[in-house]
Structures are given as C-alpha cells and as structure tokens.
Amino acid sequence: MTADALHCQRAAAEYIVGRGGDYVFTVKNTQRALRNLLKALRWKEVPVSSSIGERGRGRRERRTIKATEVA
C-alpha cells in the first residue's frame, strides 16, 4: 500500500502489517522523530530504484526514488 503523509501514523502501519501487508509512506517534517530516524540511515548504500530528469519552468529537476526496510 502507498499513502501520503496524512496516513503516516503508527496505527495505520500496525493495521497494514497485522493484515499481512507492506506499505510505503511519505514522511514530512511534521513527523520530526520519524524524519530524524530516516535521515540517519545510510542512504548512500541504498540502490536507486528510479531516477527521472526533466526540464521545465526554466530549471532542471531530478527526482530519485530509493526504498529500504526499517524495523
């Protein structure tokens, strides 16, 4: 399951895992403890899943996706 930052809550994660599922949540600065935990991970060691570069509105933009598991 994927969800935006609104659904990044412990109860939602526990419900999904309890039913045998996996999830991907967006984490923003409003979840400071979780964000700090994630920032401390060794992201340079995590392989890139997808990377897209584009030009628009007078600038170049690159979006990169990496995913990893945490306990």
Image (spheres, rainbow, N blue to C red):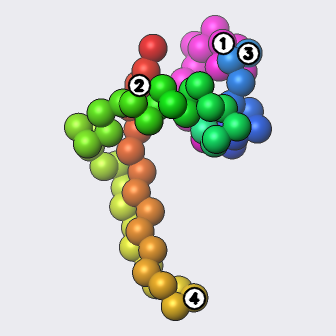
Disc with the residue nearer the chain's start (2 vs 1): 1
> Which amino acid, by three-letter code, is at mark 3?
Ala
- Marks 3,2: beta carbons within 8 A: no
Frontmost of labels 4 and 2 is 4
Which residue matches tag 4? 57
Which residue matches tag 3? 11
- Marks 1,3: beta carbons within 8 A: yes
Q: Marks 4/3: CA distance?
A: 40 Å
| Residue at image location 59% in from the left, 25% down from the top | 33
Q: Marks 1/3: CA distance?
A: 5 Å
Tag 4, which secondary structure?
loop
Which residue matches tag 2? 69
Disc with the residue nearer the chain's start (3 vs 2): 3
Q: Marks 1/4: CA distance?
A: 41 Å
Indicate the position of residue 15 as horizontal and vertical percent values.
Answer: 70, 14
Which numbered dot is residue 62? none
Which residue matches tag 1? 14
Q: Which residues are magenta?
A: 12-26
